[in-house]
Image: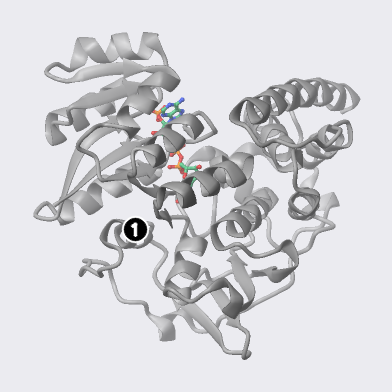
Amino acid sequence: MRRIAILGSTGSIGRNALSVVDAHRERLSVVALAAGENADLLAAQIAKYRPAVVSMATGAAADRLRQAASGVRIASGRDGLVEVATAPDADIVLCASSGTEALEAVLAAIEQKKTIALANKEVLVMAGGIVMDAARRHGVPVLPVDSEHNAIHQCLHGRGQHEIRRLILTASGGPFRGRSASELESVTADQALNHPTWRMGRKITIDSATLMNKGLEVIEAHWLFGVAADQIDVVVHPQSVVHSMVELTDGSVIAQLGVTDMRLPIQYAFSYPERWSAALPSLDLVGAGRLDFHTPDTQAFPCLALAYRALQAERSLPVVLNAANEVAVARFLDGRLAFPAIAQVIEQTMAAHKPAEVNTLAAVRAVDAWAREQAQASAREVELKV
Ligand SMILES: NC(=O)c1ccc[n+]([C@@H]2O[C@H](COP(=O)([O-])OP(=O)(O)OC[C@H]3O[C@@H](n4cnc5c(N)ncnc54)[C@H](OP(=O)(O)O)[C@@H]3O)[C@@H](O)[C@H]2O)c1
């Protein structure tokens, strides 16, 4: 029996993870859950899975949960996330909360030698060096749930970094694939939220529309697989059938293909190194018809190029990129920022930053706080010019 703690159990990945648990009740159990604000759904999950400890993002949300649930310890805030991630019975911690609040919780879980199943990419973008170093020191596996990285993990199947020539991440291209920069000036949040192939949370869906999601994934791949930025390529693949590929040093390219359903990578992370059966439909290659691959358009979608720039500079620039992106996306979703201004705000914030070493959690959090403030100021300026 593998005992699971889930950070972000009420979200898109969290709910998919619980349906994987439902499909394997003889192998998986839930011992701890954390959510943000959705007390009603967490109460329903408590009634069904009977975890020992749960947490909500804020004290107010935890109070709402106390009205609806009993027989469980209810914590809150960043400390609450740590409590859930270090629940004594948990073997595997699935990090599927949005944003970067779970960074301390992931590190605490690693110290307690819990296997990390990582869906959240922001944590690695922000502090990949610190997280992977801690995982190495404690001998803890960090298993990727993000479909592209999960695909690469499957393709590599234990092969060493020295056998990799390059990683090829596939991108659907999002809802605005093929549009020019000028055509993107007036797109709305509702249009951006209408992703062609994946159903996901709001923030990652906007990141997919700007191609920042792929940029964050390039940085994530760097930390997970230990390869340099110039060994990570991105190709636009609208059908989302090939989830990613690895080119080995002899020129062989190994790809992982499958239906677009996050239950597959989540289950693989839970079952690893075993494979369990899954009630998912088979991939219909004839139905897919053709598989296309294109070079991404970084003129119309500059966020991808900004992420490469941040990774190449390393040090604190990826922290700034991530924080500025979170600020800009939130403002776009609120209707206060135009779509192309997301990249503008990130670029301005990066330009205003003097890169520094970020080897400690405190240094990372300090740069993150600075970048959020700077990005807010930059966004206000950009808004005024609209
Ligand atoms: N969705 C996908 O297919 C997919 C694929 C690859 C990677 N990812 C990554 O996985 C992560 C989650 O994505 P998602 O699509 O599942 O997002 P989502 O649907 O927006 O869910 C986010 C989850 O995080 C919770 N949360 C937010 N702030 C929190 C806090 N301070 N403390 C505890 N929980 C908090 C939310 O709780 P409430 O809803 O209760 O507020 C919700 O459970 C992101 O990092 C994303 O990049 C997602």
For the point 34% across and 58% down, which residue is it? 269
Number of numbered labels in the structure image: 1
Displayed quadrant of residue 237: bottom right
Judging from the image, what secondary structure is the residue with disc 1 in? helix
Compared with 272, 101 (above or below) is above
Assess disc 1: are there few (<14), some (14-19) or many (≥20) residues with their C-alpha within 10 Å of its C-alpha. Answer: many
The residue depicted at 34 percent of the width and 44 percent of the height is: 113
Residue 294, given in percent of the width and then of the height, sits at 70, 74
Q: Where does the C terminus fall, quadrant-wise?
A: top right
Q: Is residue 102 left or right of residue 334?
A: left
Ligand 1 is in which quadrant of the figure?
top left
Residue extending furthest left? 26
| 72 left or right, relative to 59 | left
The amino acid pointed to by label 1 is Ala
- The residue lying furthest to the front in this view is 137
Q: Position of residue 112 (x, y in %)?
A: 34, 38
Residue found 85% across the figure and 50% down from its top: 182
- Does residue 186 appear anywhere in the picture? no
Give the colour scheme of this rendering.
one colour
Residue 229 lies in what quarter of the image? bottom right
Depicted 123 relative to depicted 386: above or below: below
The answer to whether residue 196 of the structure is visible from this angle is yes
Find out if the beta carbon at label 1 lies less than 8 Å from the nearest ligand 1 atom: no
Q: Position of residue 244 (x, y in %)?
A: 54, 71
**Residue at image location 46% in from the left, 36% down from the top:** 107
Q: Residue 216 location in percent, x, y?
A: 64, 50
Residue annotated with mark 1:
269
Q: Nearer the viewer, residue 220 or 170?
A: 220
Say above or below: 169 vs 248: above
